[in-house]
Image: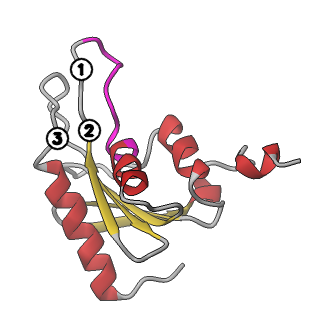
Amino acid sequence: MNLDDALLADLLAASLDARAYSHSPYSGYAVGAAVLDEQGRIHKGANIENAAYPQGWCAEASALTAMVMAGGKQARAVLVTGPGPEVITPCGGCRQKLREFAGPELLILAGDPSGLRGRWTLSELLPHSFGPDHLKP
């Protein structure tokens, strides 16, 4: 999926804004995510840590939850931001959660306060994935 510059800027701004809501007292590593749904809406999420580690939520899972609660059914793109300078991508669990709401062509973007830093498809980050289509009769 190709996104125009304005939409990329909106996704980046939403993901960076979500980082401000991160509850990361243990790692000190704030992560934000912005998911674009099939209706063109952007849903934000942040990582929420828990003292009973690893019982927290990743930013991508939080954003997917916001999408579903708003009536979204399919993710079209996701943009994840960290503090930089390292480029971050969704963890393995979040890659599988994203697969639940998108196909292998899902656009995954990474950024930080300096801007966009990387671009992949879900199939590049989660090759040969198992998804909902495997369970259809």
Of the pair 70 and 97, the residue shown nearer to us: 70
Tell me whether the residue at label 2 lies in contact with that at label 1, contact meaning CB atoms closer than 8 angstroms.
Answer: no
**Magenta extent:** 52-61
- Earlier in the chain: of badge 3 and badge 1, it is 3
Taking the spot 26% from the left edge, 38% from the top edge, the residue there is: 47
Task: State the SS at label 1.
Answer: loop
Tell me whether the residue at label 3 lies in contact with that at label 2, contact meaning CB atoms closer than 8 angstroms.
Answer: yes
Q: Residues within 10 Å of mark 3 (few under 14, many from 20)?
A: many
Q: Give the numbered dot on residue 22.
A: 3
Of the pair 68 and 85, the residue shown nearer to us: 68
The percent position of residue 76, horizontal first and vertical second, equals: 50, 69
Of the pair 36 and 68, the residue shown nearer to us: 68
Query: Is residue 101 in view?
Result: yes
Q: Which residue matches tag 1?
A: 50
Q: Which residue matches tag 2?
A: 47
Q: Quadrant of the N terminus?
A: bottom right
The percent position of residue 89, horizontal first and vertical second, equals: 42, 49
Q: Residues within 10 Å of mark 1 (few under 14, many from 20)?
A: some
Measured in 3D between alpha carbons, the distance from the residue under mark 3 to the one under mark 2, in whole angstroms, is 5 Å
Task: State the SS at label 3.
Answer: loop
Query: Is residue 115 in view?
Result: no
Q: Amino acid at mark 3?
A: Ser
